[in-house]
């Protein structure tokens, strides 16, 4: 894993429980955007058209029948992505490569 190092200035409220010394390192997350109370789906459900590169999902329309729906995406955290338009909360999105527990469906 690559590391990016840069100097920062900050404040630490030491509660006398932590010994601080020069040269310590830390991990940090930088929030570039935030979206709350929005429709989001697992990023793994999003497919991309090979020609246009536009994102889409497949919506269940019946038993093993699906309709392709193009979607507009917003903020992502790497696991979930905001859906700006194209699907609603009531749509049943096709799940790809769903893992099943070992032995599921077998009877011995």
Image (cartoon, rainbow, N blue to C red):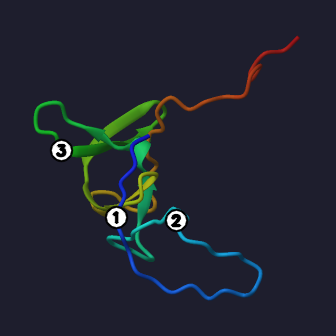
Residue that numbered label 1 is attached to = 6
Residue 12 percent coordinates (x, y): 57, 85
- Which is nearer the eye, 94 or 102? 102
Residue 22 percent coordinates (x, y): 54, 71
Alpha carbons under labels 1 and 3: distance apart: 35 Å
- Which is nearer the eye, 91 or 102? 102
The residue positioned farthest toward the top in the image shown: 108
Q: Quadrant of residue 72?
A: bottom left
Q: Return the disc, 1 or 2, that comes first in the chain's sequence.
A: 1
Q: Is 37 situated above or below 39?
A: below
Alpha-carbon neighbours of circle 2 within 10 Å: few (<14), some, or many (≥20)? few
Residue that numbered label 2 is attached to = 23
Q: Return the disc, 3 or 2, that comes first in the chain's sequence.
A: 2
- Of badges 1 and 2, nearer the viewer stands 2
Alpha carbons under labels 3 and 2: distance apart: 46 Å
Residue 88 percent coordinates (x, y): 38, 62
- Of badges 1 and 3, nearer the viewer stands 1
Left/right of residue 28 with respect to residue 100 in the rendered view: left
Residue at 75% in and 86% down: 16
Residue at 36% in and 70% down: 7
The residue positioned farthest toward the right in the image shown: 108
- Which is nearer the eye, 4 or 66? 4
Residue that numbered label 3 is attached to = 54
- Of badges 3 and 2, nearer the viewer stands 2
């Amino acid at each position: 894993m690559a590391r990016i190092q840069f100097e920062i200035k900050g404040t630490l409220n030491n509660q006398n429980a932590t010994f601080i010394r020069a040269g310590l390192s830390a991990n940090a997350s930088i929030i570039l955007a935030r979206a709350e109370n929005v429709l989001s789906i697992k990023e793994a459900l999003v497919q991309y058209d090979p020609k246009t590169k536009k994102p889409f999902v497949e919506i269940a329309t019946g038993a093993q029948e699906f309709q392709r729906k193009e979607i507009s995406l917003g903020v992502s955290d790497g696991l979930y992505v905001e859906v700006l338009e194209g699907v609603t909360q009531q749509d049943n999105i096709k799940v790809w490569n769903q893992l099943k527990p070992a032995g599921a469906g077998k009877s011995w």
